[in-house]
Structures are given as structure tokens and as C-alpha cells.
Amino acid sequence: MIQPRFIKNKNDDLSFAVFIKNYVNSENNYAKHKFSKISNSKLEILKSKKGRDIGFWTYDVILNQQKGTKDSILINPTKKQLFVFTRVKKYMIGINCPLHDTTKFDTFKNYLITNIDGIVESPNKIDGIKL
């Protein structure tokens, strides 16, 4: 396994909270470097309904997006990005969605948190070639 850029020492046995915080800080630093700034980055360490440790991370989208139409398709600017992360064995797994309507924040948050519990861990190593 390739060591992620957000883990300084490959022998570290990081707690879930430290593992996710390191990842989010790494992504925030990348965004600051790439896009000059990131706005309202927030990370919550939670438990899912099934007791899985999860990180719920959000930030405001600050790109210059214009509301309007293009080829008869309504364009709704993204207001926030929402992510839910968990750790499965030595890997971080995440799902995300853009938020176009801030009044639906709780709906999307609950959707992501509910769906992260749908992860099924294989007891055996999966052979990508056979798959």
C-alpha cells in the first residue's frame, strides 16, 4: 500500500479521529494552495447509526460560478461540498455530494451518513483480475 501524503510515519497507529483530521488538513492545504482559499471548512467526528466511526466534512464552494442556463439545462451553482469518511482496515473510504440548495443540508447529511453504513467488508482479499 502506498503511504498517503497525510501520514508522516508509516508505522503510526493513528486513532480514527487523528487519521481523518490529518486527511482533511492535507486537503485544506491543497485547496488553499490551488484555489487561494477554502471557506468554512468544518469536520465533525461522529458515530453512524451502526456504530461506525465517521468523519463528516463540509466546506463552502468559493469558485466563481454563475447561475443561469446553458443549452436549456438549468445550472445551479454548488454552495457546499459534503463528505463522509470512514476507515475500513487500512483504507479510508468516503462518499460525497455537492449541495446546491442550503435548505437541504440536513437531508443530504443524513443521506450520506446512512449510506456509509452500507459498506460491506470482504473477509478475503478481492482479486481485481477475477472481478
Image (spheres, rainbow, N blue to C red):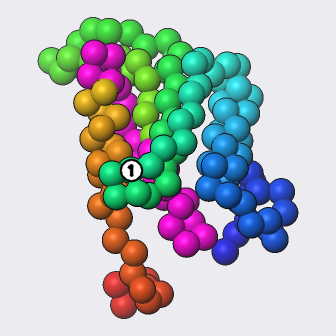
Looking at the image, residue 47 sits to the left or right of residue 117; the answer is right
* Picture mark count: 1
Work out which quarter of the rendered image holds the C terminus and state it.
bottom left
65 left or right, relative to 68: right
Q: In this picture, is 98 found above or below 113? A: above
- The percent position of residue 117, horizontal first and vertical second, equals 33, 58
Residue 96 within the magenta-colored segment of the rendering = yes
- Residue 30 coordinates in the image, percent (x, y): 70, 36
Residue shown at 57% from the left, 28% from the top:
42
The residue at 48%/44% (across/down) is 46
Q: Nearer the viewer, residue 91 or 29?
A: 91
Query: What is the three-letter code of the residue carrying label 1?
Result: Ser
| Residue 118 seen in the current view | yes
Q: Which residue is mark 1?
A: 48
Quadrant showing the N terminus: bottom right
Residue 128: quadrant of the picture = bottom left
Image location of residue 32, percent across then percent down: 70, 26
6 left or right of 44 in image: right
